[in-house]
Image (tube, coloured by chain):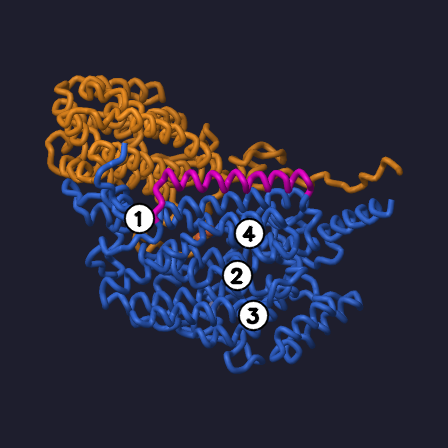
Amino acid sequence: MTVEIKTMDFEPKRHTFGHVARRIGGDKPASRYQEATLDVQATENFHYRPLWEPEFWHYDTGKTKVVMEDWYKPLDPRQYYYATYNIARANMNQSVERNFTFVEDKNLLGKLSDELKQKLIIGLIPARHVHWGSNMNTSEMCQRGYGTAFTAPCMFSAGDHLGMAQIVSRIGLELDGQTGNGLDKAKDAWMNDKAWQGIRKLVENTLVQRDFFELFVAQVLGINGVILEAIYNGLDDAWGEASLPISMLSEFMNDWQKEEARWSHSTIKIVAAESAENKAIVSAWASDWINRAEDALRTYTAAIAGDENIAKTYADKERVTAKSLGLEI
Amino acid sequence: MAPTKKMGIKQKYAHLTRGLDWETTYEKMDDVFPYDKFEGIKITDWSKWEDPFRLTMDSYWKFQAEKERKLYAVIDAFAQNNGQTNISDARYVNVLKLFLTGISPEEYQAHRGFAFTGRHLRGVGPRVACQQQSLDELRHFQTQCHTISHFNKFFNGLSEFRTMHDRVFYLSVPKSFFDDARTAGPFEFMIAIGFAFEYVLTNLLFVPFMSGAAYNGDMSTVTFGFSAQSDESRHMTLGIEVIKFLLEQHPDNLPIVQEWVDKWFWRGFRLLGLVSMMMDYMLPKKVMSWKEAWEIYFVEAGGSLFKDLERYGLKMPKYHEQATEACEHISHQLYGLLYQLSHVTGLHAWMPDDEHMDWLSEKYPNTFDKYYRPRFELWKQQEAEGKRFYYNGLLQLCHTCQLPMTFTEPDDPTTTCFRESEYEGQHYHFCSDGCKDIFDREPEKYISSWLPIQQIFQGNCGGPTIPDVLAYYMFGPNDGGEYVGSEDNKLWESWKNATTKEAAE
Ligand SMILES: [Fe+2]
Ligand SMILES: [Fe+2]
Ligand SMILES: [Zn+2]
């Protein structure tokens, strides 16, 4: 036997696709995130004007007031593509399942007083509608936005908000003995109780927002950063002995906030840093939507926790965050 | 704790999806959903929508994550073991080129399109289903890109697939198809992609490619195909539910839906012409002929589908007989064209060997020997004399489907079919009655088509000469042209020789 039988030449001719190589500084091995994301969306030679919005192409940078020289600057630090996104969420969901099993086994919600159960149904469960409105917003950012680096994570967020709306709904079902009555009551509160009207109005105002990056800022700094953050973290006192099981069952939401902010905050930072004009526009949006979220939250925390100041605390925290992203508030 | 009055799955799912939605009061519903009325579709009761599958997000993540883990394990192993050396022949790579340049970017368009309908249909049931499909279609783009990425390291014609898709003349066929759907209203998009593409025509796309991969030893693409199957079956049930729902909601919807079905059937048929030539000519190991596939998946399966839809008053798509008759010809006509033009494409072409020619005669007894074999034999003879034939003239494209005018009259395979319309003093040309009808129905939309040949004349494609245009298309010098003697061919031979040598030792 001779040893030199490996005559097959497997020297690659190139290491990645041309459009990827041009972005990563030459032909070298690219990550799966890069191949799945960079320059994926079509950019030129479109055939027809959308029947539903003929003033734009279906992929059109003009759908926002901010101007980016390149919409592939705001990349996702999590480097999510479909596979890694789903695997991450499936893993997070395993602890959701464990937590629900634990809470059920110990009957932590079942043994609460009826009064406290009702309080949670009216005060917490309507948050599922906030997630659903957020799902609509993030789907909209995906369809209306520009460039895969920005739009693909928006669709992941849409899946996340639907998932979180369903987790909140499951908490509701734990509280109402799996009858669905509690969910109906929560919806009634969402539609009619004074406590929720400011938040509902805020969410509905975002649903008609056509500028995709303003919508992004409103969602990230207003709804996620102020409203949801306060609902999941600011009401422990109001929930009393339910606060432990509730914080266990909303672990996903808290983990998610931190994780998603890595991407959404860095996106805001990069877009604002692009130019003085962008910075001014994004800063104005951020101030406006944080203010509106604060107003909306005030009615809610006053009614649910008897404490108006929670709203200011959370809004101020978000203002600090916004400043740390380079915005002028 | 065992709950006392547990709900059924259906009721529970309704709470977890429909229960989330509400009638807005601070903003008008018509402002929240501004796009779902102009098409004239009448929906009287969205709650009548039957959820075709009931998948909460937690189960979605779980199933999809499992599939992805398995798929990427295969993709990694394929690369590690140099699985590309196990394919039947390097000619097979042409199939992947067509797929990656022509299909994968459309998976991406489907992703964005379903995000659109997932946001803008007023009914919450279809919206949730569309959002999950939007995620799936992103998956398809990304996994295809990752699967074929390994082939790109060794073979030509794959590297610039994204730029090619936006610029190259024959890729404007799939691009204009999906641009057309993306720019239509949300209901038309659902009929175009959800029903016509995903339900009526999907097997004609995926069976050729995925079985083609299986027959030709491409294990990574096969694994992708299997992995996508459960996604596709969800997409099919969504497509069929949409059409039934629209037809049940209001009798006025029928004529609109019928026109869309007619339009998208014909557009889909023309697009699949590219698949037909792949299937009959590019697969070194054949799965079945295009004609056989059409018989099974359209004539039989499609026939019984439309029989089922008859109760709503829906008829078979217009010109379906013409399409079935044309299936005797289109693969030969298009491949013949590709052979002559391959030097200005990113694809290789070659003349079929004798065995392949006989297979074509057997599969197409009515047409191949009579109309196509003589031409092919002549080209082979010219090759033998060192005078391989290339066509250097200019093409005229159909204004609707954007394929070259190469198809023949329905009742006369010796005469090229030309149709013409006049709109606002301009003349427009079409390859068929089907394409002319589509234009005549919406001329304002189609006059803006980005027609690659006209664009070259207008100086928008890099310059006036052929090399200018090919540079604009980002073709490498070895991407297209004759296969025999190409770089891909030589690489393949070197691997094969090494294997034989290894075996001999
Ligand atoms: Fe797909
Ligand atoms: Fe699909
Ligand atoms: Zn045509």
Mark nearer the viewer, 2 or 4: 4
User: Is there a contact, CB below 8 Å, between mark 1 and mark 4?
Assistant: no
Left or right, residue B189 beside residue A232? right
- The reply to whether the C-beta atoms of the residues labelled 2 and 3 are less than 8 Å apart is no
The disc placed on residue B453 is 2
Q: CA distance from mark 2 to mark 1?
A: 39 Å
Q: Is residue A58 left or right of residue B298?
A: left
User: Sequence order check: which comes first, mark 1 or mark 4?
Assistant: 4
Q: Chain of mark 2?
A: B
Q: Secondary structure at mark 1?
A: helix
Q: Disc 1 versus disc 4: distance between alpha carbons?
A: 29 Å
The reply to whether discs 3 and 4 touch (Cβ–Cβ < 8 Å) is: no
Q: Nearer the viewer, residue B224 or B16?
A: B16
Q: Colour of chain A?
A: orange
Eye-nearest disc, 3 or 4: 3
Q: Which residue is mark 3?
A: B292
Circle 4: element type: helix
- Asked where in the image residue B341 lies, by quadrant, the reply is bottom right
Question: Residue placed at 49% from the left, 49% from the top?
Answer: B228
- What's the distance in space between the residues labelled 3 and 1, CA to CA? 37 Å
Disc 2 C-beta below 8 A from ligand 3: no
The residue mark sitting in front, 3 or 1, is: 3
Q: Earlier in the sequence, mark 3 or mark 1?
A: 1
Q: Is residue B81 magenta?
A: yes
Q: Badge 3 sits on which subunit?
A: B
User: Residue at point 76% right, 41% down?
Assistant: A9
Q: Which residue matches tag 4? A: B101
Depth check: give the residue in front, A32 or B240: B240
Q: Secondary structure at mark 3?
A: helix
| Colour in which chain B is drawn | blue
Q: Nearer the viewer, mark 1 or mark 4?
A: 1
Q: What segment carries the magenta color? A: B54-82
